[in-house]
Image (cartoon, rainbow, N blue to C red):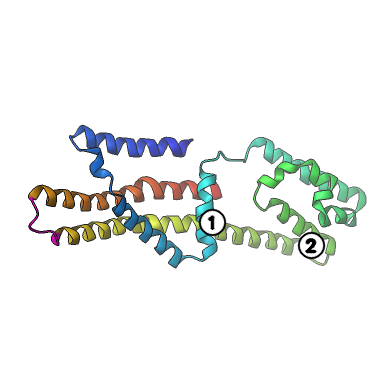
Amino acid sequence: MNVVIGLLVVLGSCVAGFMLSGGELLALFQPYELLIIGGAALGAMVMSNPLGVTLNVMKSFGTLLKPSPYSKGLYLDLLALLYDIFNKMRREGLLGIEKDIDEPAASPIFSKHTGIARIHGATEFIIDYLRVMTLGGVAAHDLDALFDAERETHHTESHLVSGAMSKVADALPGFGIVAAVLGVVNTMGSVGQPPAVLGGMIGSALVGTFLGILLAYGVVEPLGGLMEQKLD
């Protein structure tokens, strides 16, 4: 909801201010300028990132519109899951949880706490390290170091998505200038047309600069910041 409200405020204030100062709304409708800017930004993102990161950027837009799944009840459910696992280990020993970690879908413990699946990677993380514990031979401090290393790796990989968004936001003003320059080139090829026609063509070119800056600082950069917060 905050994303929708923010976008409406950003776009609404720009459009309202333009129209109240005497501007014509249709003058801002320049689909070809938008095609140049959007296509160039997408192409640059594809070139500068692995395909998986680009696809995750696309997928992440849907999650930005959804409320955060992390609540007090979810964390309590996670603590209850850990309690049930450790309690069974205390009663039956480490080997007592082998069936639970080999087939978590059929495990009464994991089936009881289904909400944990909403925490990305949590179930796999718990199962992997429980399996390491049951195999034995790993000191407590080494296990702790493995925890930290995997969390750091997960943190770095997840922030590749928000980093890609930030790079696109930085590039959009430049692509807006590219669209404006192409518009000016087109205008220069039409020298000799009536001043009203040339003025309209120059105005269309300047809209490219406007769109590049607006998309960078009013849309993509705020969305990248929100994405980073959700990942954290």
Above or below — where is 45 with respect to 30?
below
Query: Which residue lies at the image location 80% right of the left edge and 41% below the top edge?
Result: 112
N-term-proximal mark, 1 vs 2: 1
Q: Nearer the viewer, residue 71 or 10?
A: 10
The magenta segment is 188-194
Query: Which residue lies at the image location 62% right of the left edge and 41% below the top edge?
Result: 70
Disc 1, disc 2: CB below 8 Å?
A: no
Which residue does the numbered mark 1 point to in the structure image? 56
Q: In x, y percent, where is residue 171?
A: 35, 59
Furthest residue in direction front, as rendered: 193
Asked whether residue 183 is in view, the answer is: yes
Q: In x, y percent, where is residue 155?
A: 58, 57
Q: Is residue 98 shown left or right of residue 225?
A: right
For label 2, count other residues whose C-alpha is less than 10 Å away and answer few (under 14), some (14-19) or many (20+): few
Q: In x, y percent, where is residue 47?
A: 44, 67
Asked whether residue 160 is in view, the answer is: no
Q: Which mark is residue 11?
A: none
Query: Which residue lies at the image location 44% right of the left edge and 37% below the top edge?
Result: 4
Above or below — where is 218 with respect to 39?
above
Q: What amino acid type is highlighted by mark number 1?
A: Asn
Query: Which residue lies at the image location 83% right of the left edge and 54% below the top edge?
Result: 103
Q: In x, y percent, where is residue 196?
A: 10, 47
Which residue does the numbered mark 2 point to in the structure image? 132
Q: Is residue 192 shown left or right of residue 32?
A: left
Disc number lying in front (1 or 2): 1
Q: What amino acid type is highlighted by mark number 2?
A: Val
SS of the residue at dot 2? helix
Q: CA distance from mark 1 to mark 2?
A: 30 Å
Q: Nearer the viewer, residue 105 or 36?
A: 36
Q: Tell me if residue 193 is in the magenta stretch.
A: yes
Above or below — where is 47 with respect to 229?
below
